Image: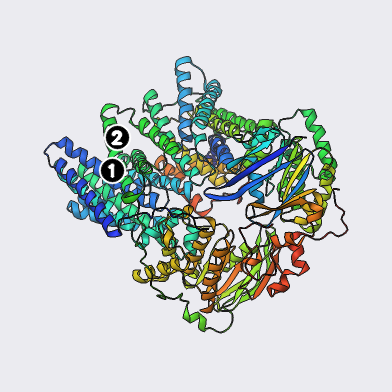
Amino acid sequence: MATFATLVVLGLLWGGVYLLMAEGLNLIYGVMKVVNLAHGDFIVLGGLLALTLFGRYGLSPVVAFPLAAALLFVIGAAVQGGVLERIPLAKPEGELRTLLATFGLSYVVANTSFLIWGSQFQSIPFLQSAFAVGPIAVPQGLLACSLLAAALAVAVHAWLRHTAVGRAVRATAQSALGAAACGLNVRRLRIVTFALGAAMAGGAGALVIALVPFQTSSGGDLTVQAFTLIALGGLGSYLGAWLAAELLGITEVMAQYYLGSDAAAAVIYLVFIAVLVFRPQGLLGRTMRI
Amino acid sequence: MSAARAARPRFLSDRAQFALQAALLGVLAASGLLIAGQGNGYAAQLVFNVALSVLLATGWNVIGGMTGYVSFGQVSFFGLGAYAAAIGVLHLALPWPIAALLATAAATSLAVPLGLIMLRLNGIFFALGMFGLARILQIAANGLNITGGPMGTTVPAAEGPALPAAVTVVIAAAAAGVVAALMRTRLGLRLMAIRDDPVAAEAAGVNVWLAKVAAFCIGAGFAAIGGALYVWNIGYLDPSSAFAGTIELQTVLMVLAGGIGTVWGPVGGGILMSLLGTVLWARFPMEQQIVLGALTMLIAVALPGGLMSLLPRRGWMARPPIWGPPREASEGALPLAVRVAVADTPGPVLVCRNLGKRFGGVAAVDGVDLEVAPGEVLAVIGPNGAGKSTLFNLLSGFAVPSTGEVEFAGCKIANIRPYVLARRGVARTFQTSRLFPTLSVWENVLLAAISRHRRKAHAVAAATELLERMGLREDWARLPQGLPPGRRRLLEIARALALEPSVLLLDEAMAGMTGPEIAQVHQVLRAAAARGCAIVAIEHVLPAIAPLAARVQVLDFGRTIAEGAPAEVLHDPTVIAAYLGTDMAGTEFAHA
Amino acid sequence: MPDLLRLDAIHAGYGGMPVLHGVGFALAPGETMAIVGANGAGKTTLLRAIMGEVPITAGAVWFAGRALAMLPMHARVRLGIGYCPEGRQLFPMMSVAENLELGAAAATRAERAARLERVLTIFPKLQRLRGRLCGVLSGGEQQMVAVGRALMGAPRLLLLDEPSTGLAPRVVQELYESLRALLGTGMAILVAEQNARAAMRFAAKTLVFEDGRIALAGASAALLNDRRVIDAYIGAGGTAPAAAGQGRI
């Protein structure tokens, strides 16, 4: 029983981290209906940056977290502004072309990371002890990362609701034409959105690398995981994504424990396909926008 | 208002073009065999790689290019073929050719249930779903102990690369030949139509599901043979190589670079990109994927049609419309036929009672009764948003009613797929033109004709006759966007008539037509009605249909507000108010 | 007075399909004009062409002396054109107040507050709906928010694209009565409408479109009960097919 409770708690904490990993993708999809296939590679890149900052300068992931996010922000802006903006989304093949472009980008980022960091699984040892809450052993590192992830997610959410630019981004997601009719520079907003999505991915990576090791080729798996999450939650919906994140966190942790890591990886993909095929509108049943 | 006719495009006939393509493929294959047979192991291995790439690219092109379902998981079948063949050789002691054939058969059969699941997805979801499928299969292979799990196993291989190279060259050339032939069959035409517009294809009587699954299986089959050949050549099998993401990247890039959806695109792209890949692997192995990835981005942004889009697509390079050109039609050849069986049934051929459709809280159609008898012309008019197009969607099976029912020839149409209805004789046009942009005028009509006629000769004759009647014969080879708007509408009507319908639903079909064009349409419609075809025509402006229509039904806010002869309805104040707004007699002018 | 808006023989269309053929007219500051005509006659395309949504293949659009040719839509809005697109295009998950405030994104807080007051005076019903999400409003309420949002930009020219779509006649009447408050303020108004009578009672001048060309032009009062306008919509007695494609008079 204690084991089960532990698993649930761990799952909930992991959910917070997953949420951060997926939020960036959700934001981009909500505004531009584009799935960035390089999202997972951005997460890995953020993690490896944090690794270098830790290894070379002894910076803890807590500090590396905003730095990685900042760098990925710049990279994201460059990608959207320099490359993806050239594909007109209005035409029907625009979405597919963007998908193909991010498909290529994924390989570029993954391979560049490989050149810099090599192919081993790497991780940061950080807060590796656990403290006990009753019969449950809560790992400190996981708790810290989960809280930070939640903090960032909440911060972005608040930014979207209460700042002028944030509201402009939400408006663009709900009606790009309406936004333009309000005099909003939709092109610039798209660049900001993509950059922010990339930044959130980078930040998530900096946190996750302190918890589990990954390698430069893990990007693809992470993209699918993030996409599963937001598909399950209903693309574009924040509440749905949070629910899905917690569910997925618990499922992953349990699958790992009871079935082993290989099977756990398969579980994610099966859920992914099942959601796409059987319930594309997500858990909450309708696509709410941000 | 006849425009100056451009020089009629010249094409080689179907047979001649196919012969030319086959010859070219033969030349390529022969050179491949020559190089492979040189005795230089390195050259033979290179030929093998190139040929394998062409094979994979061709397979991807069938589902990705011809049908429009871009996949990021074609490597699933590559791996399946590799594993099945290896198991056949290792554990069933089969000789390689048998093992390869069985593996291909196994993978292709597996593609049927997989296709039925995955093809429910569209666009990016399909692409990602296939990616997920590939990863699932890789993980499953990791757990497969009879093939050594994640570490893999050695497999008895061919001695030297020469034989695999030769075999692969032949198979790749044959695959490209199959695709070239496919583009001239009913299935090929249907796939290209589905790629352009699946809804219009369904309305033209195409069983979209069956066609998609067929294309999926063909693509899977090619990939599976490739997998088996790969293992035969390399002598080693492990999950991460058999389901490698780089294979997917290279395949996608090859087709994209060459020209998605064309015959030569995968061949040219396959040759070029695999040579490039080999050079990169030799010189810059670490950076290979960066270059290929960057190239993919570049092409997606700057040249989405690939290299083929750079070549002038005229003369002998152009894709000739299939089964063309239409011969000079002789006078009174095949009259416009109509289902005799239906014309026999007494009473109205199309009936709807209390038909309603709600979207969210809004009733687009609200309790509409309608009936039309064989040979009758009913006009349905009403202002914007009155629910006319929704009504048509309900009548043609494209929407499910919230209330009420529709009967066609005495049968309720509740659960019948639209393409079945189309084949049974309910034809429609769409309010915004839904012609197939990459198919010629001739092919647009032919697609519907083949849904009606099993024999090629009949379909060709029927399509020829229709083009002649509509005055479109001269433009048979043009693409729809090259026609002025009125003639595009003529084409849509022709396509609908090619189904030889007993009920013809025209949705603002005469919008934008000139006087003479309208007169021509009236002539054709009169002939169809004389043969017993019932016509329901939505028009926003009545003069287009008034000369033909015995009755007019006026809709507003989803309900019928008036019915009767055209003259009465046009002067009915309720109707005028619905269009122009209520007189608001008491309201003063806002301005001076 | 120089024209506020001028179109010089523009041709415009979608993809390969031309819709507008040689349309030209001018609007002075403070003038009101109704664009009426049957479905597909080109009314919406005209407004979209002015706003840059639809490419112009020949001719030019001038606003306050500036050529609009290469400007993206948001830049045109910032020049002083308020745009109420077809279908309203509100932000359904945001409140009425948020929608309205986004219309004044470029203004200072004080200006925004002042303009909001003004809009609420024109549409008093919106006062009590301030906090409501736009997605749950009725059609008429949504239309008011849409117009209000365009007004928040303090435009010199207001473009309304078929504001009466899907609205019951009484609601249409209310809407146009509210819009009267805008007359005489110096704002030019161009309204494209299917509901010809409401528009023609509101605007001083009328252009009747047919097949992408101007078929009739003149003072609204004179044209209101002109049989030719009715014909342009529903058609004559219905004997021979109307000479579509050849303009009237």
On-image quarter of the C terminus of chain C: bottom right
Q: Quadrant of residue B36?
A: top left
Residue type at mark 2 is Gly
Residue type at mark 1 is Ser
Left or right: B561 in relation to C17: right
Label 2 SS: helix
Q: CA distance from mark 1 to mark 2?
A: 10 Å
Residue C243 visible in the picture: yes
The image's mark for residue A176 is none
State whether residue A285 is above or below residue B528: above
The image's mark for residue B277 is 2
| Chain containing the residue with disc 1 | B
Residue A124 visible in the picture: no
Q: Which residue is nearer to you in this view: B83 or B394?
A: B394
* x 23%, y 49%: residue: B24
State whether residue C70 is above or below residue A91: above
Position in image of residue B576 (x %, y %): 75, 64
* x 75%, y 56%: residue: C196
Verify CB contact (< 8 Å) between mark 1 and mark 2: yes
Position in image of residue B471 (x %, y %): 47, 65
Q: How many marks overall?
A: 2
Q: Quadrant of residue A265?
A: top left
Q: Which residue is mark 1?
A: B53
Position in image of residue C103 (x %, y %): 72, 37
